[in-house]
Amino acid sequence: MAERPLPYAELIARYGPHLNYTPPGGYDEQRENPPDRLVKTHCCFCGQQCGIQLKVRDNQVVGFEPWEEFPFNQGMLCPKGVRRYLQSAHPDRLLQPLMRTPQGFRPAQWDEALDFTVARLREIQERHGKDAVAIYGGASLTTEKSYLLGKFARVALGTRHIDYNGRLCMVSAGTAYKLAFGVDRSPMPWSDIPKAQVAFVIGSNVADCSPITTQYLWRMRDAGGRLIVADPRMTPITRNADLYLPVRPGTDLALLMGMLHVILRDGLEDREFIAAHTVGFDEVAKSVQAYDPLTAARKTGVPPEAIEKAAHWIGEAERAVLLHARGLEHQSKGVENCLAVINLALATGNIGREGAACSMITGQGNGQGGREHGQKCDQLPGQRSITDPAAREHVARVWGIRPEEIPQAGLSAVEILEAIHRGEIKALLSICFNPLVSLPDAGYVREALEKLEFFGVVDFFLSETAQLADVVLAGSLHEEEEGVVCSAEGRVIHIQKAVDPPGSAWQDSRIYIELARRLGKGQYFPYESSREIFEELREASRGGPADYSGITYEKIDSQMGVFWPCPSEDHPGTPRLFEGGRFFHADGKARFLVTEWRESGDPVDGDFPVWLTTGRVVSQYLSGTQTRRIGPLVEQFPHPRVEIHPRLAEQHGIADGDWVTVGTRRDEITLQALVVRTIRPDTVFIAYHWPGGRSANRLTHRTLDPRSKIPEYKVSACNLRKAAGPPDWVRSELTPEYPRPASGLKVVG
Amino acid sequence: MFGYEFYIDPERCIGCQACVNACAECDTHRGVPMITVDFLDRRNSIATVPAICMHCDDPTCAEVCPADAIKKGEDGVVQSALKPRCIACNNCVLACPFGIPKMMTKLELMMKCDMCYDRTSVGKRPMCATVCPSQALAYVPPELIARERREKPSNVFQFGNQTVTTKVFMMVPPDVPAVAVDVVDYLWEENP
């Protein structure tokens, strides 16, 4: 059904991605006409949520100015932050709803587009049941929008299937932290990092994915601390690592268990802390007995001496921070990996003190806040479980419905696609999500979307996914609607509206409120402003682990953010969790949980002998819907390249800049090689921000972690061969102004 | 800004190019950056290095300029070439020991970093040093650098027989008094 209405070349010629290089009217115009005002807000690209000031003139964002008073980043930004303003006033911006016709998309009035959407959703629900409709959300939405979306799915549509692209982000960490600590949040403010004597960074490319965190690590080293980095690649922070552990993709668990083995073997554990504040230690101690350094070394490819040294540095330090991100979490044993980090922190008493904690580094803009208030398939607002009768009762009361009217837990993001393939889900309404680029096994994703009887998308640009939609509702950018988000630290901050949506585009929340009204549920969505949604959210979260009830917009502004939980208006918030060894479980104790080794869901063999791992570059954000439209960011890294060690490259006769075909059990793509000594010789790396022929996710597989349902992006098996020449995408998938791949040996990455 | 100095620590650079992008966005630059970040040797290393004008005490660029177009202010900042004087001869580009000046061929004008004069004169830090997320570029009081960094600042560079002292400091390991970059500096000759 939902095939593209026009050939790809025609769609991109009309809707982009085109590249925006200058502010509205050009630099000279801006220089002659100073901005009307500076709006203090935050960057929309990544969970660091740096403070930034947007220059605004005539209801347009025309530039930026650092915001040096905001404590987290003190004016610092990465290139995405510097150029973020170029997404505003962009020529590709959707200014009104679009409806698909056999000849392509045509502009539509809001009434027509909304009525059509509601009619299709109703008809499908009447024919196939409420759960035949699913909702996709996103973790770049404000917390108000995330909350609204969860309520929309459960109250306006009555479907249990709502999930979001945070499912591709840190859900493994969230699951592990809830199991071990009873709550899902970074346990520390980032100001704790420089206080540590050792920082252990595993599976986190800090420099590219959370650049501001770099200076916290450097400050730790300035104070005499030591940095340990575990990664299959030497990422930029490795240049100052005191110890580098070149772990083989998918084997982090063996490394972590080996480290705990050494700590316990040599008596470096904190017996007092373990006895007073934890349960389950003995079972975990037993489970790592077999993971002596040599065994761990054989699995991981990390020298046994280095494993010993890392364990000793952490075990002997008074204060250590253990930081992890998608490298650990994007595995079919992602939850185990995070639990193994937690076990290390608990065993050494590194939690709940200044400069001592383990923490995930949340990736998406509102990666933390977006998962707290109800767009996760199994959660209600306040980070409550949807299966908990008390939680259902509380939220039902706030929503003005009966508890039994709240649907039970639904399917996760990838499972929703599988249900579409099975014919169980017939309609999908998606916002802030570009699954065709971001979900694994892109061919499978496309087939699912094409099977839908109705596909509606809310977006501000026509993303690759939106190209398949029946109706596209023109929504709002980050700077066009007020709200809050929660940063990687757990700090709730205030996103200011800088400008109105242009043309006939609407604020996202207005779209969902209007859809609810037309579904006959308007009385449950009476909001006139983001603030009114936030006030209800505060009540809905009251008493839950993520308690926002004491947070107000004014308090956020006066305190430069409020760390949750914040249970009353006179409460200052909680920058550091678990102080005094008090955890969120009913007995106040943390859980040691046994981790068990398993192989990856896509193991290497004779046909696919090389590991493939994927990740990000500093100048692009996620599926690139926004950042692939910003000229200077595109020029910085125009196309993905295959990073290959010279030893592996030589085996295949591949030189730097050569075209290489990378194949997996799903598909193959052809990219240029980047031959570098900064990656393991048994592993290749491809960044995933691009669509079509450049899409790394055509190669990845759909194996999920059984508990977190996160896909295993970081571990696939592949093979390589030198290609005869440039692939089709060079000719067919780039708009005319898009930089062409360099033909010579110039290394751009 | 009184009491502030500029420090470069290439070892802390993560190659993100926030500085390059921010420099281009500075009001007076109209999209053209006056700073570069390069890989030293990407095949063998992830190391990157930012390069900005070092603002020499006796600027070689000005010394070799036949049109007297390059001026140093009382604040020690060496300016871009003066548009009415510059003859686009490239002498400065070739002579600068740090390789900083760029010839803007279309404008027939040498342009380079002026340490964000428009910002520092109104109490703001230079754009690149404000946004740098990794402390590779910093514009801070010297006391802060002395207190917080493990490396020491140096502003004396030896290029063969030429000793260059600069306004901008380079962070170096604590036991290195001056940065020598030429093998000649390490040679021994009986009668030099």
Image (cartoon, rainbow, N blue to C red):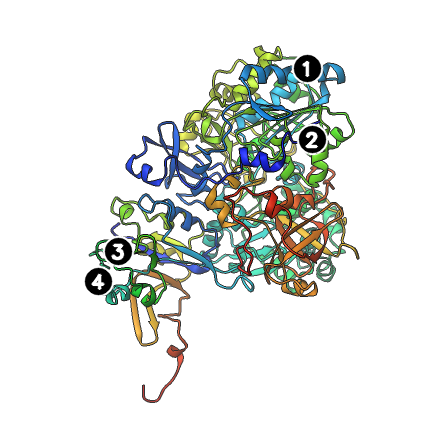
Estimate the x, y position of residue A538 in percent, counting from the top left.
52, 22
Question: Label 1 vs label 4: CA separation?
Answer: 78 Å
Q: Amino acid at mark 3?
A: Gln
Q: CA distance from mark 1 to mark 2?
A: 19 Å
- Dot 3, crowdedness within 10 Å: few (<14), some or many (≥20)? many
**Earlier residue among tags 1 and 2:** 1
Q: Quadrant of residue A53?
A: top left
- Kind of residue at badge 4: Ala
**Res B67 label:** 4
Q: From the image, state whether disc 1 or disc 4 is nearer to you.
A: 4
- The disc labelled 1 sits on which kind of residue? Arg
Quick one: A722 or B153, which is closer to the camera?
A722
Q: Which x, y percent locates residue A432?
A: 57, 31
Judge depth for marks 1 and 2 and give the one in front: 2
Disc 1 + disc 2, Cβ < 8 Å? no
Residues at marks 2 and 4 touching, judged by CB atoms closer than 8 Å: no
Pointer 1 and pointer 4: residues touching (CB < 8 Å)? Answer: no
Is residue A195 visible in the rendered structure shown here? no
Label 2 is placed on what type of residue? Leu
Disc 2 marks which residue?
Answer: A449
| Marked residue chain, label 1 | A
